[in-house]
C-alpha cells in the first residue's frame, strides 16, 4: 500500500499549505481537501473511492469539483463513503442544486456520476488484501478516523478529533500498526480554542499519546498556518521522546 499526502494543513496560504487529503495507491482518497486539486486530470479520473472523515469544508472542498471534472471520463460512479450524518450534510448543503449539482442524480452513459455508501463505526471495507476501517473520532460534527491496512502493516489516521479514549481502545490489538497520523491544530496558547473546536493542542496531544499501547511512528497533521513552528516546538518540548514528525505535502508512506 502506498499513501501519498496531498494535503495535511489546517489551512491554505502557500505552496505547501493544502488541506487534508491522502491518496491511497491510485484509486482511494481519504478526505478531499484542497490538495486534491494538485492532481492531474488523468489521476483524478482513476479515483474510485473517497472516504470522508467528516463534513467540514477543509476536508471536502475538492470533492464537488473533482466529481464534475471526471464524470465523463469514467465508466463507473465515484463512491463516496462516510457516516450517514456526513452524507446527509453533503446532500443537504453541497450536492443540493443550489451550491452544486446533485451528481448522484445525474446520469452519464446510463449510470450516476457519484454514489453514496454509508459506513458504520468499526466497519472494515476490503479492497483485495487492502482494507479501510472507520475509527472513532470526537469533533464538533459527527466524525471518524480511518485505519488503512495493507495486510502486512497499517496506518491509523485520527481525522479531526479532541481527547478520545475510544480511538485508542480501537487500536488495541492491531498488531501490525506502523504509522500514526494525529492532528494538533493549535498551540497551547490557544488551548481554550482547541477545546471549544474539539481539536488537539500539544498538552492534549501528550495526554492522548500516553494511551497508545503499541509502538508506531508518529506524524503530526492539521497545524494551523502561521503556528507551525510554535506548535512543533511545544510538541517537541512535551513529547519529544516519542520523536513525532511534522507531516508534509508529498510525504509517501509505503507499507
Image (cartoon, grey):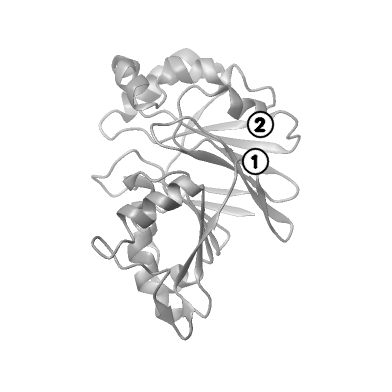
Q: Which residue is mark 2?
A: 170
Disc 2 versus disc 1: distance between alpha carbons?
Answer: 8 Å
Q: Position of residue 119 (x, y in %)?
A: 58, 50
Q: Is residue 79 left or right of residue 39?
A: right
Task: Indicate the quadrant where residue 40 lies.
Answer: bottom left
Determine whether label 2 and label 1 are within 8 Å by CB. yes
Residue 247 position, x and y percent, is 46, 38
Mark 2 or 1: in front is: 1
Say whether disc 2 or disc 1 marks the residue closer to the N-terminus: 1
Q: Residue at x 54, y 20 (%)?
A: 208
Q: In this orientation, which residue lies closer to the viewer: 62 or 55?
A: 55
Which of the numbered marks, if any, corresponds to residue 250? none
Residue 236 shows in the view: no
Quadrant of residue 241 within the rendered picture: top right
At horizontal 46% and vertical 86% (from top left) the residue drawn is 109
Q: Residues within 10 Å of mark 2 (few under 14, many from 20)?
A: some
Assign a secondary structure to mark 2: helix
Tell me the element at label 1.
Answer: loop
Find disc 1 in the rendering and name its residue: 122
Amino acid at each position: 500500500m502506498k499513501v501519498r499526502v496531498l494535503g495535511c494543513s489546517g489551512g491554505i496560504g502557500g505552496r505547501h499549505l493544502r488541506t487534508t487529503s491522502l491518496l491511497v495507491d491510485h484509486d482511494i482518497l481519504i478526505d478531499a481537501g484542497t490538495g486534491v486539486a494538485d492532481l492531474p486530470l488523468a489521476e483524478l479520473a482513476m479515483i474510485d473511492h473517497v472516504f470522508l472523515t467528516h463534513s467540514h469544508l477543509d476536508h471536502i472542498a475538492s470533492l464537488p469539483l473533482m466529481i464534475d471534472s471526471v464524470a465523463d471520463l469514467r465508466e463507473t460512479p465515484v463512491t463516496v463513503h462516510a457516516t450517514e450524518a456526513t452524507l446527509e450534510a453533503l446532500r443537504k448543503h453541497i450536492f443540493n442544486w443550489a451550491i452544486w449539482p446533485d451528481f448522484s442524480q445525474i446520469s452519464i452513459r446510463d449510470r450516476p456520476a457519484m454514489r453514496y455508501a454509508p459506513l458504520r463505526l468499526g466497519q472494515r471495507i476490503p479492497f483485495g488484501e487492502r482494507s479501510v476501517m472507520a475509527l472513532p473520532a470526537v469533533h464538533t460534527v459527527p466524525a471518524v478516523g480511518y485505519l488503512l491496512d495493507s495486510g502486512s502493516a497499517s496506518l491509523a489516521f485520527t481525522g479531526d478529533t479532541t481527547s478520545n479514549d475510544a480511538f485508542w481502545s480501537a487500536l488495541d490489538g492491531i498488531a501490525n500498526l506502523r504509522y500514526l497520523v494525529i492532528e494538533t491544530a493549535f498551540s497551547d496558547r490557544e488551548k481554550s480554542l482547541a477545546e471549544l473546536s474539539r481539536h488537539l493542542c500539544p498538552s492534549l496531544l501528550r495526554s492522548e499519546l500516553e494511551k497508545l499501547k503499541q509502538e508506531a511512528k508518529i506524524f503530526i497533521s492539521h497545524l494551523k498556518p502561521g503556528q507551525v513552528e510554535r506548535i512543533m516546538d511545544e510538541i517537541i518540548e512535551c513529547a519529544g521522546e516519542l520523536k513525532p514528525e511534522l507531516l508534509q505535502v508529498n510525504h509517501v508512506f509505503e507499507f
